[in-house]
Structure formats: structure tokens, C-alpha cells
Amino acid sequence: MNTAAPASETTAAPGLTLPGEVVTAAHVRLVSVPGVAGQVALITLDNGMDHTRPTTFGPQGLANIDAALDQAFAAAPAAIAITGKPFVFAAGADLSGIGTITDREIAHAVGDLGRRVFRRLHDSSIPTFALVNGAALGGGVEIALHCHYRTLASNAAMVALPECFLGILPGWGGTQLLPRIAGPEAAVTVIVDNALNQNRMLRPDQALRLGVVDVVLDAADYLERSLAWMADVLGGSIAVPRKDYRADEAAWSAAVAQGRMIADLRTHGASPAPYRALEMIDLARTADLDEGFAAEGDALADLICSQTFRAGVYAFNLTQKRARRPAGAPDAALARPVAKVGVIGAGLMATQLALLFARRLHVPVVITDVDQARLDKGLTGVRREIDALKAKGRISGDEANRLTALVTGSLDYAAFADADFVIEAVFEEMGVKKQVFAELERHVPPTTVLATNTSSLSVTDMAADLAHPERVVGFHFFNPVAVLPLLEIVQAGHTDDAALATAFATAKALHKGPILVKDAPAFVVNRLLTRFMGEIIAAIDEGTDPAVADGALAPLGLPMTPIMLLQLVGPAVALHVTETLAMAFPDRFVVSRNLRRIVDGGHRTLVAFDETGSQSLDPAIAALWQQGDRPSTGDEVRDRALAALADEAHRMLDEGVVAEAADIDLAMLTGAGWPFWLGGITPYLDREGVSERVVGRRFSPPGIATLPA
């Protein structure tokens, strides 16, 4: 086994630099640990910034880790341990640099460098320990996997290998080490299933159960506990079991097959990354590390130089950067404090809002409705959700009691007299909403922000008859409220900067990613989805087999089929939004008589599943649907749907509904679940040539690199 690489191999490859790399330092300390004969070399990874800028690895940072390992091995310690700065272990590769690579040789060199440096921990004859003191993502998990032993802090915010979510794979040893350490089933869960399931993170207890780490230790004195655990391991009083998973060929094959089913379900083959990752996991059963690492390196280089990864990095940057600094938001200093919130309505959406405000803002929230029965039902629903959060361990008993006390109800609008922010979530009808705001205005001061959760109606018209229309703003959430991060903040005709700034500050406090939207019919997401869905429904109306139309978009890897989306939204809501848009844009939006027939019949379930899980139109709906005699092929349906999206998105930009194409992409990523590997709508439409074919020009959103032809 190696103890130290030759000096000539300890630096990054000559000329291997990435633009804008935030260089991670690796500090070495020799520490004495009770019960350990000799000193321990403790390496701390730190990029010199606070926890809001996680530690990442680029070529120079990897070279620093390499040099730190030289120093550690030279000291001939009893053990080598690696840890991170407060709250952060390491967040993996520096995407801002790796995302710009278009040369396969450079991509290969970056992968090779990371594997070579990390492998020194794996091959060491000196015991190596990863003390994962905080968030660990991607390469942060991989450097820990190279160590002989792994501890994890009980408050670590997240543990994950999210690479497939972005369009690549764990390429610094993850696909080869994790299945050997934790088994193929756990590897498929972490590398493929979690990554494709909205980039799901592991909690510490889950990481332990899956075998990603050996022990979870209390965060209060985590480092001391980790070193004491290390002493017990070195002294032999703690034995850490290791299982040879590679001996069970059947279980290994079953896990990989399950992974392929998951990849098919989530991506429909639209992203190559999970399939390449599964090939590598499969290879790990029979290959030695040299062979496995070489294959992993080839796969990583291929994926880094793919348009899928370009799109993934662009999408990642939108959700991590633009969502936090929304374009067009006014000066935050203009925002008013929000110490009390009112919610008008006690239905499902309203109660979700009430709980979100209470949980994130920790301020009193008062809900109201037209009668005591509905109000009581809403309050009961809020308390039921609080109890469910407590039962799942998401909140403590004290927090549950606190939230229950914060959310109250009243039938009297006078209860909002001291509220700073009131949002209505009543029936989607302009007259009802105008009446609510008119009555509310008599009870609140002019500084109270009045927000509407309307999904399609004009906020300007809603505020037109008020004495103070300047404090009215659109605040459109997406369902489920607690999950989807998008918030469309609508600037109406008279909305002033103070109200707008308060809305953006409140969105940030709610942990939402807002975009500023001009007051236009259905705003962004609903307008695009309705245009898109309208083409699918129209194709079925014309005579296309529903299965053909519904499956036409499968090659894009969308999170659900159009008819499933229609069922999720609800036919009545879809009909209402379509009617609103048809009034505004009758040349492009047509109300389907079949959709109206479905709504009039009270139908909510549109999809049926057979014993194999295959989806089809519910027989009752199929019998109701009246079709013409002009069927289309799946390709024709897909072409018309994509053309409609390109046309509508360009119109929205020309109208100034949003500032840039990037805002359209961000909205669809975070509000409609548009896949990361497509990079949002506009890069995909550009790549496929749809933009130029339909409107004669590309969107060319800033911040997305395009590979040379």
C-alpha cells in the first residue's frame, strides 16, 4: 500500500486550471488523542469563507489536498483524519469551473486528478478517517468514501451524490466505492434514485442506515467524539464490520435492474447520466479498482462534455444564484417588517399558506372564512399538518405547540387591523376577490401589503377600486406549497416599491425563490403550461389516440405526462385558466369542449392504471371524449407542442412579462418540475432548432455554455 506519492506526482497536471476556481486550502495539524499511541494528522478543508459558501474542489484545491497528504504521511502519524470548516465538510466539484470544460482531455484530467489524490487515503497503510462534520455533497462524499472509516455529525444538513441530477456521475471513485462499501442497492438509491427524485438528500440517520457512514455522533462535541471513536477503533474495542457485497451476483443484478427501471421512469432515456452510472455500479462487482476507476473516468469525461451537463449546470446556477438574487427586485431596504400575517380563506391552499407563514416567519397568523364551520375545518387541517410534522420528526414537540398557538382564526376582518401582510386565497373569481379586498381595506392601515394568490387573474383590475392600490401585489404559490420553491411576485399597475420590496423580503423569509412578473394573464408558468396542454388536448380532440398524444413528450423526460398533469392541476382549474387566457389571446388559446364536458360532469380522475402500472385514459373519460377524424402521430404532436412553447415564450419576452429568458427557465424548473438535464425550456428549444424554426431567432439565455458543433 502507498504511504505517500512521489513528489513529482503531487501537483496538479501542468496547466490544469479552471477559471474562477475558489481555491480550497487543506490545513494539517498534528494532534494528540487520548488512547492513541502517537499523533493524529488532522487535515481541515476550508475555502476561507463562511458556511454560506461551501468548500468545493477544483484543480488547485485538489493539489492543496495532495500536498497536505504529503505532509501528513511524512509525519508518520498513528492515523490521518480529514474534516471540514464549521457546518460544511465539502460540497464536491467546483461546478463554476468544471461546467465550462468543452475539451475531453481536460475533463479526463480533472477526473483523474481527483481520483488519484483521494485514492491515497484509500490505499494508505496508515488508518484514514473522514470526520464528516457537516454538509457533504458529490466529491465531499467521495473523499469520505476513500477513507477507511467515516463518522457523521448528527446535524449534518445534507449528504448526497447529486451528479446524475446535473447530467454527470460521481467520477472521483463514487460509482466504484459506494457499492463495495454499502452494497449495490444502497448505491443505486443514493446515486440514481435520490438524484433523480428532485435531488433528494440523506439525513444523518438515513446515511447510517444505508451504510454510507459507520457512525453518527452528537454534533455538540462532534470532533471530540469522533476522535474518541477513532481511538476505540484503533485500540480494537470497536470493530467496524465490512461485508463483501460482490459475492451476491443475483442481488447485485437485481439492484442494477431496479435502477434502470427508476431511470426509465424518471427520465425516459432523456438523460444518459443515470444509465452510465448504473453501468459503472454494475462493473464494480467484477472489476478491480484500477479497471473500475479507468471506466469511471471515461464515462465522466464523456458526460462533462455533453450538452446535458451544460444544461444541468445552467439550471443549477439559476436555482442557486438567480433565485436568490431575483432580477428587478427593488432595494431590500424599502421592505417593511412583517410581524403579523392574515390569510383570507380556510380551504386547502389557504391552510397550507397559514402553516408556511407561521413555520418560516414565526409570527401570529390569523385565518378567516365566511362561516365558523369552514373556519374550524381549516384550523383543524392546520393542526393535523402540525401533528404530522411532529410525528415524522420534522419538528419538536415544543415547536408543534408554538405553531399551534401562532395560527388562530376569526370571522371578523377586524382581526387583521394590526397585520402587516394579508394574503387572499379565495375562489378564483374576480368579483369575489375585489369584494374581499374592498372589505379588508376598511380594517387595515394603508401600509398593510395586500397580496393575492391568484393563478391567472389581473392583479391590476383586482386593485383598481381600492383607495390604496399601490399596496396590492400578486403572490402566486404553487401546489404543494411546502415543496415547490417558485413564487411568482406580480407587480400590478400601481404597486409601489415598498410593497414590492416587502413581498420579496417575505418570499426570502419563506425560503422561496421568487421571480418578478409583469401583470399579464396567467403570468408565466400557467400561461406556458396551458398553451402546451392546449396542443395536447387539441390533438386528442382532433382524433389522435390519447395514448399517442399523452406519450408524445416522453423523449423529454418530463416529470409526468400531460394528462397526469391535467389531473394534478384539476380539470376545473385548468378550464378556468384556459378561459382566462382565451379571453386575452383568442388566436392561440381555445377552450376544449371536451374539457368543459369533463368539468361539467364533475370528473376529477382522468387516468387509470393496469396491473403492470401502465397509464391510460380512464374509461369513463374516454367514453366522454368526442373525437374528430384527423389523428396525428406522436412526432407531430410533440412538434406542435414544442412550437407552441417557443412561440408563447418569445411573446412573453417581447411583452416584458419577465426580464429575461432565464426567468422563464427558472420558473419552469422550480414551479413545473422541468428537468434539470434539459436546462429549462429555452436552451432546449434552442438546441433542438425549434426557436429558429418557429420565430426565426434563438433565446440564447445568458449563462449557458454551448459546445462547439
Image: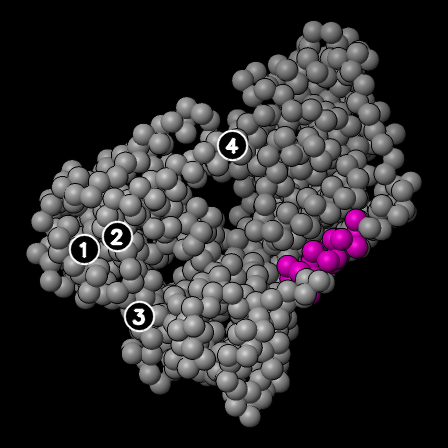
Answer whether labels 2 and 3 touch (C-beta < 8 Å): no
- Between residue 67 and residue 665, name the one nearer to us: 665
First-in-chain label (3 vs 4): 4
| In contact (CB < 8 Å): disc 3 and disc 1 | no
Is the residue 181 above or below the residue 273 in the image? above
- The relative height of residue 120 versus residue 34 in the rendered view (above or below) is below
Which residue has dot 3 on it? 521
Q: Residue 391's mark?
A: 4
Q: Earlier in the sequence, mark 3 or mark 1?
A: 1
Q: Looking at the image, is 152 positioned above or below residue 667?
A: above
Image location of residue 394, percent across then percent down: 50, 33
Which amino acid lies under the numbered mark 2 shown in the image of this protein? Glu
Q: Is residue 656 visible?
A: no
C-alpha separation, residue under disc 4 versus residue under disc 1: 36 Å
Residue 683 place in picture, x, y as percent: 52, 68
Q: According to the image, what is the colour scheme of the structure?
A: one colour
- In contact (CB < 8 Å): disc 2 and disc 1: yes
Say what secondary structure mark 1 lies in.
Answer: helix
The mark found on residue 436 in the picture is: 1
Amino acid beneath label 4: Ala
Residue pictured at 64% horizontal, 37% vertical? 140
Residue at coordinates 35% horizontally, 85% vertically from top-left?
587
Mark sitting earlier along the chain (2/3): 2
Check disc 2 and report the residue beneath it.
Answer: 424
Q: Is residue 665 left or right of residue 77?
A: left
574 or 214: nearer the viewer: 574
Type of residue at label 3?
A: Pro
Alpha-carbon distance for marks 2 and 3? 18 Å
- Numbered range of the magenta stretch: 255-276
Say if mark 3 contacts mark 4, CB within 8 Å. Answer: no
